[in-house]
Amino acid sequence: MSAQLIDGVLLSQQLRAQIRERAAALTAAGKQPGLAVILVGEDPASHVYVRNKVKACGDVGIHSVLEKYEADLSEAALLERIAALNADPAIHGILVQMPLPKHINPHKVIEAIATTKDVDGYSVLSAGELMTGLAGFRPCTPYGCMKLIESTGFDLRGKHAVVIGRSNTVGKPMGLLLLQANATVTICHSGTPDLGYHTRQADVVVAATGRRNTLTADMVKPGAVVIDVGINRDENGKLCGDVDFAAVKEVAGYITPVPGGVGPMTITMLLMNTIESAERTK
């Protein structure tokens, strides 16, 4: 029996409807949520991502400010602009699109964003808030993954979750969010000698390595929830994830497709963080 697909497109639409209502309520009260997006340079993929984020803001009633700069923008000028946006009461979230030109230190840029406006959830303080269980902004992709798991009705309490990948943007925060939901968490990575040993014991597997076929059917416990964060291309140029989808869906209980799974949720959670920032602002 094939796994039940977790439809990220549908869930994203449902959540955006809720965000739209919250944005309308804030706007009616005289405080329209605002997101500033900064793009430096001419990276083609970044331009696509930024365009999608700005469009998504418009669709739900969030005011967006898009600032584009040439690749030779100085680090000092970028930091100065971030400081001005930090002080702008009409802006509730600041997003600097990565990657940045090589002469700009991304860590310094991320840390320059006020924690109250760090809607990407990437700063050291945001990571610390997640680590210690304080209210803060969760990185958008792991946050979206948790919503996808939640949508299945699967109870994480006491379950074994395996995260494949240890990046600061997905793997590590994913593990912490699962831990907060009372799952028992194992984080695997390139140094794990027998990945299948761990995944075969898992009730939930989150694959976030950026490598095709990291998770195959023989590595999955029957009935497990499988969340595929990967974005890759197969030999025919077709979009695919980290999971051998065709085979794994015959074993898993729930599975996210690529595309149409985690992807739509990432921007949605950025919108959610922006709304939450506006609601927290007095």
Image (cartoon, rainbow, N blue to C red):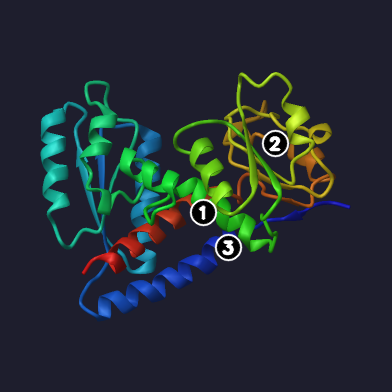
Three-letter amino acid code at the position of disc 3? Leu
**Percent position of residue 103, x then y:** 22, 21
Crowd class of label 2 (few under 14; some 14 to 19; many from 20; radius 10 Å) = many
The answer to which image quadrant residue 229 occupies is: top right
Image height of 126 relative to 215, above or below: below
Residue drawn at x 67%, y 25% is: 235
**Image-based side of 200 in relation to 66, left or right:** right
**Percent position of residue 66, x then y:** 24, 50
Q: Report how far apart the C-alphas of labels 2 and 1 lie in the structure.
A: 18 Å
**Percent position of residue 264, x then y:** 52, 53
The residue that mark 3 highlights is 11
The answer to which image quadrant residue 199 occupies is: top right
Label placed on residue 265:
1
**Percent position of residue 230, x then y:** 59, 36
Q: Report how far apart the C-alphas of labels 2 and 3 lie in the structure.
A: 21 Å
The residue that mark 2 highlights is 243
The answer to which image quadrant residue 196 occupies is: top right
Q: Report how far apart the C-alphas of labels 1 and 3 lie in the structure.
A: 8 Å
Q: Earlier in the sequence, mark 2 or mark 1?
A: 2
Tell which of 225 and 59 is nearer to you: 225
Are the residues flagged by discs 1 and 3 in contact, CB closer than 8 Å? Answer: yes
Three-letter amino acid code at the position of disc 1? Met
Crowd class of label 1 (few under 14; some 14 to 19; many from 20; radius 10 Å) = many
Decide if residue 121 is in sight here: no
Label placed on residue 165:
none
